Each structure stands twice: as C-alpha cells, then as structure tokens.
Amino acid sequence: MQHAGTEIVSAVMPIIERWKHEEGPLLPILNGILREFGYVPREVLPAIADALNLSRAEVYGVVSFYHDYRENPPGRHVLKVCRAEACQAMGGDAVAERLQELLGITFGETAADGSVTLEEVFCLGLCACSPSAMLDGEVIGRLDEDKVQEIAREIRA
Amino acid sequence: MCFVNEIDYGTPAAKSDKTVTLSIDGKDITVPEGTSIMRAARIAGIEVPKLCANDMVKAFGSCRLCLVEIEGRGGTPASCTTPVAEGIKVSTRTERVQAIRRGIMELYMSDHPEDCPACAAGDCEMVKMAETVGLKEIRYGRAGENHIWPAHDGVANPHFMEPDLSNPYFAYDASQCIVCSLCVRACEEQQGTFALTVEGRGFESRISAGMHEPFLESECVSCGACVQACPTGALREKSVIEKGMPEWSAVTTCAYCGVGCSFKAEMKGEEVVRMVPWKEGKANRGHSCVKGRFAYGYATHKDRILNPMIREKITDPWREVTWEEAYAHVAKEFRRIQYQYGRSAIGGITSSRCTNEETYLVQKLVRQGFGNNNVDTCARVCHSPTGYGLKTTFGTSAGTQDFDSVEHADIVMLIGANPTDAHPVFASRMKKRLRQGAKLIVIDPRRIDLVRTPHVEASYHLPLRPGTNAAVLNALGHVIISEGLFDEAFIRERCEWDEFQDWAEFVMQPENSPEAVEKFSGVPADLIRGAARLYATGGTAAIYYGLGVTEHSQGSTTVMAIANLAMATGNIGRPGVGVNPLRGQNNVQGSCDMGSFPHELPGYRHISEDATRAIYEAIWGVKLDDEPGLRITNMLDAAVEGSFKGIYIQGEDILQSDPNTKHVAAGLAAMECVVVHDLFLNETANYAHVFLPGSTFLEKDGTFTNAERRINRVRKVMEPKNGYADWEVTQRLAQTMGLDWNYQHPSEIMAEIAATTPSFAGVTYELLELEGSVQWPCNEKAPLGTPVMHMDGFVRGKGKFIRTAYIATDEKTGPRFPLLLTTGRILSQYNVGAQTRRTDNVVWHEEDLLEIHPFDAENRGIRDGDWVKLASRAGETTLRAKITDRVAPGVVYTTFHHPDTQANVVTTEFSDWATNCPEYKVTAVQVTPSNGPTEWQRDYDELSRKSRRIVHVEAAE
C-alpha cells in the first residue's frame, strides 16, 4: 500500500512540475492529474501541498469542493446525467431512473465490473436539447428510451 | 472578584490617519478611514448582531446577521465587510433588517441542537443571537436533513460526525458547528499554520483539520486560536466541558518562554478553568501557544511537593519538617559552613522562572545576608553573551525593539533561533509580516520550520556548520563593506567613525571573504553574498537571534558581530529594525536586570562602582564586597576542590540544564548543604539536603520582564498550595538568618528596586495597573517606558564597532567523534520539561529523539526509530533516532526535555570566552546502534528512585 502510494506520487510529480511555477497552479495541477488518472488520489495531496508551499488542509479544502476531483478511480466509462431544472422539466427524472435501472447502480456509484461510473451533474448548458447527459466527455441531447438503451449498450460493450 | 470582559469590535482596527464621520442610528461617530461599519457601530456603543466576525481576523461576511441599511444605497450590506464612508447614514435596527436576521437565525437554528450543552452553559452564541434578533419559532422543525442526530428512525445520519476528542485540550463537535469559518481564518491569519479548512460544499461543508484527520494527527499546533474564535460550542476547551464556565478572572502573564504573553486566568473558585490570551497584552496581542494556553496543569500536579523536607545525607530518604525547622536548619547550616570554610563558601542561584521581586530578594539575601557576591542565574547558560555583547556595543544588555516592531520590518534575519517551536506567539506575528511580503534570511545549521512553511519561504537559508556563526557574520560584513552597502551617514552620526574604519579593515581581510568562509562553514559564498545584499539593501531590516548564537565558545563575539552589522547598515533606533535576542524563559531578562550576576548590581551596574554600592549599603545597612563573586561553573569547581559547601537554588534544575551533567553532579555531591527551592523534586534535588516547596505563577503577585524589556504583572489567582509564595519563603529564610526584612507585598519590593535602580525608577504597581505593562528604561526621561531603544543615540553615547575575529572552538570533530551535535527545543515541551512533562503536552513529544541525516544513518546501519548510543568526550547516553534531511550530513540534533535522556551528559564544558555561557550548540559526537540505556542512565535512574523516597510526617511519628 505504502509502495503503491509512493508510485502514484512519483507519477504525478511531472504534472506538478509542469504547473507549479505558473500563477494559480493548484487547479491546473488537479486538472492534469484528473486527465491522467481519472481521479485525484488522496495520497498525492501532501505532495502537491509541499510543492506549492500550502498546507495539506488547504489543498484538501479545494479538492473536496469540486465533485469532479473524485477520490477513487472511475469505471471505464463515466456517465454524467443532468439533473437540473430544464432537464427535469423535460422528463429528466424518468431518464435518470431508467439509466440507474439499466446500469444497476445509483448515482455516485461505480459498477462492480468497473464498466461505468454514474454521476449527477447540474446543467451541461444543453438546456435546448433537454434532457441531456454526457458520456466520456461527449454530450448527448434529447434523451429518450432508444438513446438510453444505446448508452447502456455502449457501456456494456 | 470580577470577570475581565473584553470588547469585541467585530473587525480589526483600521490603520489610517484620515478620519471619516458618519451617522449610525442617529449617532454621529468619527473613525479612521477603512474602519468597518460594524466596528464604528461598536465604538459608538451599538452592537450589531454577528456570528462570523471578531476583531482578530479580517471580515468575511458569511453569516449575514450583521446586515444594515444605508440611506440612499440599495440592498442590505453586511456591516462587517462594508467600510465607513463620509456622511453616510446607517440604520442597524430597521424592521427590514430585523426580519432578515430572524429569517437567517431561524435557518441556522433549524440545524443546531435544541439541547446544545454549550448554549445552556452560555458558551455558545447561538441562543444569545436568537434572543437578540427576536427569534420565536423554528417553522422548519429539526426533523429534516441535519447534522445533529447520529441516527434518525434507526437509520444512521450520513451528515453526522462523531465528536473529535483527539486533542487533549479541546473537543470538536461538528453537530454544533455553523461553518462560519472563523476557526479556519484564525488558524490562517492569527496563528499562520493553515491547519484547518472547510471541506466539501453546500450542506456537506464541514470544518476539517488537515485532510479530514483527527485534530491531533493534522498540522494543528494546538495554539487555541480556533477555540477562542468559535462562536458556538463546536470547538470548546475540555476543561470548560468538565468544570463548567468560569466565574471570575484576572489578567496575568504566562510563565513559559520569553515572549511573556498576557492571559486572562479564568477561574472557578480556586481552580483554573481556562487561560485565555488577553487582547490588550502588548506582547501577544491576543494570541497564544499550546504551552501558555493549555499546559498549566502542572500547577496542581500530584508530584508537587507541598511540605519542606530535610535529610542529613543525600542517600537518606526525605523527612518532612515544618517550615520553621527548615528555615532554622538552613540558617544554622549556612552559618556553620561560613564559620568553618569562610564567608564565600556559600552562594545562591536566582531563577528566571520566578518574579523580578523574588529574584531581587535572592540576590539581596546573598549580598546582604551571605556577605558575598556568589550569586548567579540560569541566564548564565543562555543569554549572558547577549548581556555582554550588547552592553559593549550599544550600552545596554537588552534587545532594542518591542515585538510590534516586526510589523514594520521589510527584512527579517533570523540567526540561531527557532521561533515556531521556542517562541511560538512571536513566530506567528513574524509569519504574519512575512506573508505580507517581508523577506526572510535564516542562518541556522538545521532547516527550521520557517525556512519553508505554508505561505512562508526564506529568501536565503545559510546552513552553516555549528560553531561558525562569527565567521559567517564577518563574511556578511565583508560583502557589505566591499560592495559599499554600508550606511555612511548613520555611522558618521551615531558611531565611532575610527572604530568603524578599523572594523571595515578587519572584515575586508581575505580570511573573512565569503569564499574563504565557505571552506569551513559549508555555506556557499553566493548565498552569503546574496544574504548580505538583501539585508543591507532590502529596506528596514531586523535581526532576531536565539541561543544558537549565544551558546557557543564565541557567543559574545557573535552577538557583537550582529551589532556590527546592524550599525554598519543603519538598522538601529527606529521601528522595524534592531537587534533582538529571543530570550528563553519568562523572566530571564528580569533576572538579569535584577542583579543576578556575580559582578553586577540591579540595572547592570558593576559591583566595583563605589557610588552604586553606596546606594545599597545605605539602605541595606551592610558593607558590600566590591569583588565579583563566583559564577555557577566556578561554584561547582570550587565545590569539587572543597572550598564551596552550601548553595540556595531557587527554581532552576542545574543538574539537567547545565552542561556536563557528571561535573555538576560531582560539584553538588561535594557540598554539605544544598537547598533546592522548587515545585518538584527535580533532578538537582537528588543531591539536595533541604527541599523548600515553591509556588507557581498562579499563586503569587509580582512581575516578569519579557524579551522586549516589558514588565508585565503576574497576579495571584489562587492560594499557594505549599502555603507561601517564593518571595515569602526567601524573606522568612533571610529573617531566620537575622536580616531585618519586612515586605508585606511584592509591590514594596518593586518600590525598593525603583528607588535604587535608575532604569526602573518610574516603575510602580500603580503604573502597571494603569498601563498594563511598561518597557524599561522607565524613569523621568521616559515616564511610560521605552518601546524602541537608541532612537536618538546609543545609550553608551556612540555605537562601538568591535573586531570579531573567528576562532574555531576547541571542540573539534575527529575520527572518534566525527559528527557535530547541536541541541534545541520543541513546541510542546519547555526546557527540562519539569512542567510540560506533567501535562498532556506529552502526547506530542514522549521522548527526546536524535535527528540524523539519512546519509550518516545509512553509514552506521541505523534505521528510523532505532535505539542509538550518542557519545562525546564528556559522556554518553542513548535515545532513539529520527532520520531526516532537516539536518545536514555531519550534524545531529536533539532536544533536552526528558531527564532519562540527559542530553547534557554528552555536552562538554567549553564555554563562551567572555561569560562562561556553555557551548551547548556544538559537541563532537559519535552515533552507534545500541540496545538500550547506558550504564550512566541506569545508575542515575537508580539514584533518582532512591533519592526521591519521602518519609511522611505521619509515618515518622
């Protein structure tokens, strides 16, 4: 465990080095780690704090504020479903229910087989095409039963 | 008995010369520009409701209770974040803002426990604020989502957090928290540790120590600022939870380090409920550290000895006796010894832990009663070179500035001091200034915390080899002269120009060049050059230094080298500059001021001065010896030789704190009457024949003088558990020896000090009552004291430059002892630990550890946590190793807080050439793996156990 932790820390060092001299380097570093690993392992926070001369608490405060900086590795796919007002008005609740049913997990969970992580999101800026979702960074609008089925198929593939 | 209440103005004072006049609720008020409306209102006597603001941290505007209306402006701005403006008309109590406040409070209370124990005790603002805003009902109920209940209807509440009781002194109960972030801001702005944060967001947001860690495991240093700031019961002292709220309080002064923080001792009857830093305290400005704030439990510890004790031989068990018997015994023994061995066969040691008045009495007892000058003090082993060096160069034996001065410094040069551990409250004030942009230069063998700690980073760290201070400072001087960075106008006006030229010629010698000094100090020449340029040209520059400067064979030389640099760059005599010793003990400055040294009468006047002696001879009615007496080390030497036989030691554990423990032990063992006057059976008491129980700072009136020459009042808040304050014991002893002493109160002793000492002439208890504190010199010329010295000229007239040639110490590394040991302190413990080891502070530091560089450890096959033997030419001890790169290769470091380690068994007898201050900071040592305690440690342990046997009076009868 200790060993794995150290490995992750050395793996993020180049990302820290890349940004640490820029102005306001904390968010770019966290984004870089997120891009590289898909999550922000708790073990790397002290290393970031040390590099930026911040306290552990400060880094943790920022990381815990943003839901995107998840603590554990996500599934192979990440599905974010919009739960904001416009989507709800266009039947988003039913879509959300259906997706949880099809994937067999609830929001905030990762499937046991590691296929997918299901997350809530509050507005993708795609209100004109409500209800909407985002699969692995690609937005999908006007969700209906067919599209929901297709998403589930793609995830299981 | 009253309760000292302090006004909370809600936001800090604004510093501006311009004033603004506005009207608040129809009252006109004029305040400095930049003042918040909230503060202006409070000054006008109007309390605006608030939860998330206090006057120790910047306004934040999160609770929204303090909303007001301003005529002609829209909305309802928060009064804490809105600055005053000329002519505005503010209303703090309109129907509109009252309704909003009620609505906000209703929301808060819907997630605050109905049966909040802190609210019930009056230690939570919530109920008070609910009443203030007129909250009648909570329409939302408390059944919905909340942080209050561990479980609801049998289902665990995901928002509930178990209280964190990990810190020994305070509890964190998140269910009472309103996430106002005052604690986070106090930790950042006041303490400067940044250990707290708000985690998560929205309804999930919670105060977190470190990365959602228990407080004890986080970066928290337990200074107590968060507890003090918390408006609810979320962060509370455990002592208040156990004992209930205090009933009365008195302002007093902390008895730990030389910062001299003012505290309110908050009491319930005779019991301390808590110590709360006093905002008006000019040394600490309302801040505190883990020792002063929490570690007072030793005062009531069961180990305290409360009855006098006597024994014939140190191998006998102790026998409890009456005070009268004890005094009579000491008087008889001291007189017998003097009759048998001569007048100078006895002496006394004053304490830097006791009050000025008590110290004055001990030296008076020696000079008047013993008829010699054999008096010394623990300052001998810490800052005696400061006294010598600054007296020689500037003309006074004290630091030049007050602590407030650091707020004006652009450059801080820190030499051989580790303030975040040893002077934590001053460190916080310094860090605050550094975060505002002041630059830091650290000269220290070890990478102390301040070299790099959140939001503070030294511009230069010069990691010199222990013992090369003077050389590195000379090299700084070399750069300043060779590059023409000196302040010629200042030097011509304020110093002896010829002496300056002589000094300039000296530092310009090739052996003082950075390149030459690099060879043996290990500090790269470019670092020395960079640091010198920054110090000389960066603006107002202040030097702060500690025992890493003085406890060397060249301690006095280095102090003078520091003074040279300050004079050469004109950094003396105004705010933000100066030469500032960080003194170790609460009253080490005072004990020096009070004539504790064998060659000086109070006020640093030499014993050979006829006029000075005449002052004392007139009122004491005796002829004083005009020859200096023996220093501690000389007393011990003389004891071993057989000419020194009796000693009265007040409040100092010389066996543990003085160098070369074996020699101290031999000296004490050779005496016939060792009288120890202390709280506990300390290590020295193992060699004592008479034990007189001492009293704590909570049990007596008096004054302490801190590192900035500030005379602070100590106020009695409980009766002495042993029956008598230390000054009373000394007085009774003096009376038994036939002296006509008749002090009814310490204020009368201060009156005698003032009457006989020019620099204290104006000091009275009435003045201290009025002003809170004063900094000496306090006399006709400066009736309210002197915050910054040497403003219009040096005390000695012209500043004196002195050649400070570097001479390597005789303590050298070689094949047998290849490493250099240096020693220091840790935050949670204090000196020999007699007090702090008897408090819960031990959770942070259970034992002394030897810090060793990974390279040196690997060479010796030492792993982290291994037992190692630490051996020097003087002796050996064992302790466990901590592998770290904070120390350079070739250097090891340890603390001296625990008697079973006895680091001073290892330290040698080398000492400062001018003052005999021991060279604690350099010892050549070898470190080898070990299985356990050395023979000395085992023998000593056995001796201690035997020596502490007490036969109680009841048992004896």
Image: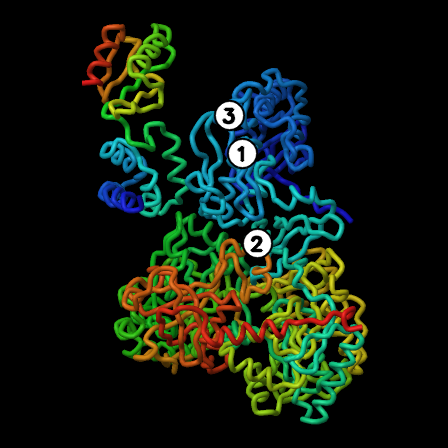
Residues marked 3 and 1 touching at CB (< 8 Å): no
> Of helix, strand and loop, which one carries label 2?
helix
Of the two numbered discs 1 and 2 on the same chain, state the one appearing first in sequence.
1
Residues marked 1 and 2 touching at CB (< 8 Å): no
Q: Cα distance, mark 2 to mark 3?
A: 33 Å
CA neighbours of label 1 inside 10 A, class few (<14), some (14 to 19), many (20+): many
> Of helix, strand and loop, which one carries label 1?
helix
- Of all chains, the one bearing label 3 is B
The front one of B608 and B122 is B122
Q: Residue furthest left?
A: A157
The image shows residue A109, relative to residue B365, as above or below, that is: above
Q: Is residue B119 left or right of residue B729?
A: left
Q: Cα distance, mark 3 to mark 1?
A: 13 Å
Q: Which quarter of the image is occupied by the C terminus of chain B?
A: bottom right
**Amino acid carrying mark 2 in the image:** Asp
Q: Which residue in the protein does label 2 denote?
A: B840
Query: Which mark identifies residue B157?
Result: 3
Q: Which residue in the protein does label 1 denote?
A: B174
- Of all chains, the one bearing label 1 is B
CA neighbours of label 2 inside 10 A, class few (<14), some (14 to 19), many (20+): some
**Amino acid carrying mark 1 in the image:** Ala
Q: Where, by quadrant of the figure, is residue B725 drawn?
A: bottom right
The image shows residue B188, relative to residue B45, as above or below, that is: below
The front one of B123 and B298 is B298
Q: Position of residue B74 (x, y in %)?
A: 52, 20
Please identify, in this view, whether the residue under mark 1 or under mark 2 is nearer the observer: 2
**Amino acid carrying mark 3 in the image:** Asn
- Of all chains, the one bearing label 2 is B
